[in-house]
C-alpha cells in the first residue's frame, strides 16, 4: 500500500508552543499505522526547521520538500484559528506520478492546491481530500471561507468536510441534507460534526458514527487523522464498518496530544477503542 500526502506542512502556534502541523503531517502519522510506504510532498519556507520531521522519519515516513516563501503558519487565539501566513502555493510542477501510489491524500491548508493538481491526482487508485484548504481564503487573519465550488466537479473517492464547510458548499445547514447533496458529487463523504460524531457515506452506504473522546487535550488534526486512516483502510479493501471504527479509534488518540505524536499506537489499542465505536454505530442505509 503506497500512500502519498500532498500539501503544505505548517507551523502551529498554541500559546508558547510552536510545532509541526498540517493535514499532511497528521495524515502521514495516521497512514503509518496501516502501511509502511508513506511519502509527503510539501512546500515550506526557510523559517522551517527540518528537524521537526525527524520523529515521523523515525517512524518510517519519507519527505520531498521544496523551500519557497515563508511557511504556512496558524495560531489558535481565544478558541478561533488565525492564519498568520498562508505559505507557498502551486504544486503543479512538483515531480510525482499518481499511478505509482495506491492512495493520494490531498491535504491543502490554505488554497495551495489548484484544480489542475487535483485532476492530475485522480489518475491514482484512490484519492481523498480535506476540503478545508480548498475553501479557505489566503488572507491573513481569522479563517474565512470564500471559494472552492470547483471541488464539486471532480469525482474524488473521499472528501472530508466539517458542517461549516459542507454548508458553505451546499447552502444547507442540516447535516443529513448537506451530505445528501454532496454524495451526488463524490464516491464517499466524511462529514465530521464535533462532539456529535460524524456521518460517513461510501458507495451507497451511510453510517451515523458516535464520537469517541476518552481524554480531550487538543482537537487539532482530528479530521486529518480520520480522513487518512479511512482512505488507507478503504483502499486496501477493509469492510466499511471496520474501517470507520478503526479510523475513529485512531482519531480519539490524536485528541490526547498537542501536535503530531512521536509514537504509533499498538494494533491492540486501536482494536480496543474501535470496538467501543463499532457497537454504537448506526447504519442509515
Image: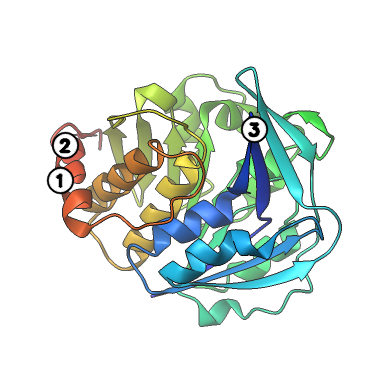
Query: What residue appears at the point 38 percent right and 62 percent down from the top-left corner?
Result: 232
Query: What residue appears at the point 71 percent right and 47 percent down from the top-left corner?
Result: 150
Image quadrant holding the N terminus, namely bottom left
Residues at circles 2 and 1 in contact by the CB criterion of under 8 Å: yes
Say how the picture is coloured: rainbow
Question: Which residue position holds label 1?
Answer: 272
Residue 144, compared with residue 117, is above or below; it is: above
Query: What residue appears at the point 39 percent right and 65 percent down from the top-left corner?
Result: 32
Q: Is residue 162 left or right of residue 279?
A: right
Q: Residue furthest front?
A: 16
Q: Residue 81: which quarter of the image? A: top right
Q: Label 2's element? A: helix
10 Å crowding of disc 2: few (<14), some (14-19), many (20+): some
Alpha carbon separation for disc pair 2 and 1? 7 Å
- Residue 125: give x, y in percent of width and height: 47, 72
- Residue 74: give x, y in percent of width and height: 70, 38
Question: Which residue position holds label 2?
Answer: 276
Earlier along the polypeptide chain: callout 3 or callout 2?
3
Question: Which residue position holds label 3?
Answer: 16
Image quadrant holding the C terminus, namely top left
Alpha carbon separation for disc pair 3 and 1? 34 Å
Amino acid at each position: 500500500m503506497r500512500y502519498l500526502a500532498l500539501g503544505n506542512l505548517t507551523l502551529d502556534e498554541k500559546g508558547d508552543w510552536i510545532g509541526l502541523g498540517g493535514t499532511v503531517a497528521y495524515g502521514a502519522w495516521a497512514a503509518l499505522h496501516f502501511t509502511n510506504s508513506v511519502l509527503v510532498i510539501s512546500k515550506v519556507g526557510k523559517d522551517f526547521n527540518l528537524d521537526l520531521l525527524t520523529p515521523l522519519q523515525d517512524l518510517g515516513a519519507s519527505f520531498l520538500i521544496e523551500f519557497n516563501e515563508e511557511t504556512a503558519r496558524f495560531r489558535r487565539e481565544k478558541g478561533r484559528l488565525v492564519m498568520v501566513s498562508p505559505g507557498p502555493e502551486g504544486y503543479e510542477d512538483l515531480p510525482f506520478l499518481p499511478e505509482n501510489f495506491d492512495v493520494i491524500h490531498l491535504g491543502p491548508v490554505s488554497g495551495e492546491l489548484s484544480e489542475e493538481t487535483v485532476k492530475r491526482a485522480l489518475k491514482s487508485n484512490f484519492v481523498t481530500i480535506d476540503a478545508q484548504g480548498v475553501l479557505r481564503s489566503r488572507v491573513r487573519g481569522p479563517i474565512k471561507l470564500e471559494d472552492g465550488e470547483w471541488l464539486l466537479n471532480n469525482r474524488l473517492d473521499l472528501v472530508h468536510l466539517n458542517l461549516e464547510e459542507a454548508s458553505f458548499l451546499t447552502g444547507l445547514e442540516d447535516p443529513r441534507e448537506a451530505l445528501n447533496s454532496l454524495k451526488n458529487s463524490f464516491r464517499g463523504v466524511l462529514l465530521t460534526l464535533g462532539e456529535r460524531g460524524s456521518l460517513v457515506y461510501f458507495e451507497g452506504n451511510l453510517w451515523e458514527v458516535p464520537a469517541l473522546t476518552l481524554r480531550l487535550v487538543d482537537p487539532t488534526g482530528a479530521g486529518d487523522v480520520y480522513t487518512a486512516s479511512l482512505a488507507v483502510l478503504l483502499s486496501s479493501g477493509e469492510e466499511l464498518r471496520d474501517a470507520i471504527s478503526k479510523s475513529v479509534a485512531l482519531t480519539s488518540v490524536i485528541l490526547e496530544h498537542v501536535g503530531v505524536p512521536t509514537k504509533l499506537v499498538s494494533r491492540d489499542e486501536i482494536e480496543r477503542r474501535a470496538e467501543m465505536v463499532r457497537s454504537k454505530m448506526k447504519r442509515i442505509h
